[in-house]
Amino acid sequence: MEELEKEELQTRVLNAIKSRNAKELKEIFDTVPNIDIAEAVEEVDDVASLLYIFRVVDNEYSAEFFAELPSEQQEKIINAFTDKELIELINNSFADDIVDTLEEMPANVVSRVLKVCPKDMRKDVNTLLNFKENTAGSVMTTEYIEMRENTSVKDAIATIREKGRDAETVYTIFVRDAKRTLVGTVDLDELIFAKEDEKLEDIMNRDFVTCSVNDDQEEVANMFKRYDLNAMAVVNTENKIVGIITIDDVVDIIVEEANEDIARLNAVSSMDEPYLKTPIFKLVLKCAPWILVLMVLQVFSAMILSRFEDSIGQFAILAVFTPLIMDAGGNSGGQTTTMIVRSLSLEEFDKKDYFKVIWKEFRVAAIIGGLVSLFAFGWLMLEMSVGIISTESVIERATAMGANPYAYMSLVAALVAMTLFVTMIISRLVGCSLPFLAKLVHLDPAVVCGPITTTLVDIISLITYFLLWTQIIGPVLGF
């Protein structure tokens, strides 16, 4: 929504609550998505105002609206609800939404919710709560439609009409045999266009895709993308269906995983709450440890600079270009790491393709390195010629040696250009190798590769720079 529309909706909702205008509030819920209404009331602290919404709005909206509220408001509402109201809310909610809510709640609130849960719902919620975080089992829902393989199309449609509103989706029907083993799936459109007397076993898709309860949620999301699914069955070791994952769950997974990867690639712990609602001290704890770790790692860069302190003292212009070289290398390595982590997460290739990727990145790096080094040589010559970069130490050395200052400037520019060429190649090879190495030792590439790539490339680029100086350019200039 546009910012102006958000403000107008917020004003409209708050006025309806304040004036206890039930008709206006119902009209808002009939015409505006629940997520937008939840955002409009996120600043409301008065429990009575929040309760008024639930006591006025129809049940078909209230459960979904509750699921969109921040956890602080959810806790206040649960504590203020009577047992009857809480049972009514639970009966209109999906088990996975209840689990998402309870994961953020203190133990006493969880206990109360489970206490009033209907027996079947309590069993489902407890099951979901006990699955390992970020697995298929932890994000699945247990509200789905399953039928026997010998069910007729006519009876199947009647069942959907009877039970469909309580299911997470009616677009995919899961078919089982007498032993409750999953044997196929039927899409709603196939059901509608089939003859009434046909059996589900006659029209079902036997070549279906499933996942295990312990599969990582990111792998599940990739399966949805690969096979273009709307829903997928989650099965146990005996191939019996225990729940389903739907496309709306996958959208949440993709957003969550993307946010985590972005945060980790930039050396920040992932955020559990919106930025403006995260306490300052919590932000400090998320950022400071990484900064301290990277400072410790950067001691190697400082050590290299100290080893070549004499060279820098004799020819001060060397120090001018170290930030340029380190930044260029870090940026190049970071680009590669981001692309490889993304491709690995999307399963565009796997560990066995390492040498193909290395060979491709080497060619890319050689071309980029050539372009960067040529540009750097010309640009640095221009900057030194017009005085943007001070060349006093170069002119003094050239004068002492009876040489042309521009010849010495060109050698300095060539030193930087050669360093950048080597750095581009090494940084991209390091940037694409680390994600593979992380996968090999079963670590999250996004966690490991961002900060380590930058640090390694800084060290390598400095070593390259000063080795080229001491072994090639320095002796030519008489050092």
Image: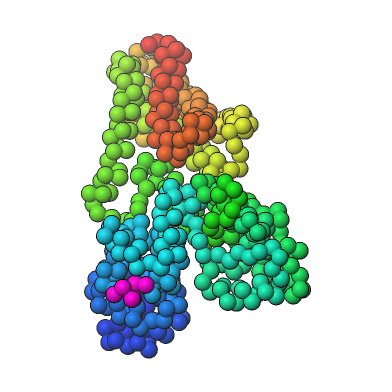
Above-or-below relation of 186 to 216: below
Q: What span is colored magenta in the figure?
A: 82-87
Q: In which quarter of the image is the C terminus?
A: top left
Q: Residue 192 location in percent, x, y?
A: 70, 73
Above-or-below relation of 267 to 5: above
Prevailing SS of the magenta stretch? helix
Q: Residue furthest front?
A: 178
| Residue at the spot 58% in from the left edge and 66% down from the top edge | 145
| Residue at the spot 76% in from the left edge and 63% down from the top edge | 202
Query: Front-most of 182 and 47?
Result: 182
| Residue at the spot 60% in from the left edge and 61% down from the top edge | 230
Q: Can residue 326 be seen in this view?
A: no
- Position of 220 with respect to 53 (left or right) is right
Q: Residue 80 location in percent, x, y?
A: 26, 72
Q: Is residue 133 visible?
A: yes
Name which quarter of the figure residue 197 lies in.
bottom right
Query: Front-most of 218 and 333?
Result: 218
Q: Residue 218 location in percent, x, y?
A: 51, 48
How is the protein colored in the picture? rainbow
| Residue at the spot 44% in from the left edge and 21% down from the top edge | 464
Query: Front-most of 130 and 476?
Result: 130
How many discs appear? 0
Q: Residue 278 location in percent, x, y?
A: 28, 55
Q: Quadrant of the N terminus?
A: bottom left
Quick check: is 8 in the magenta stretch?
A: no
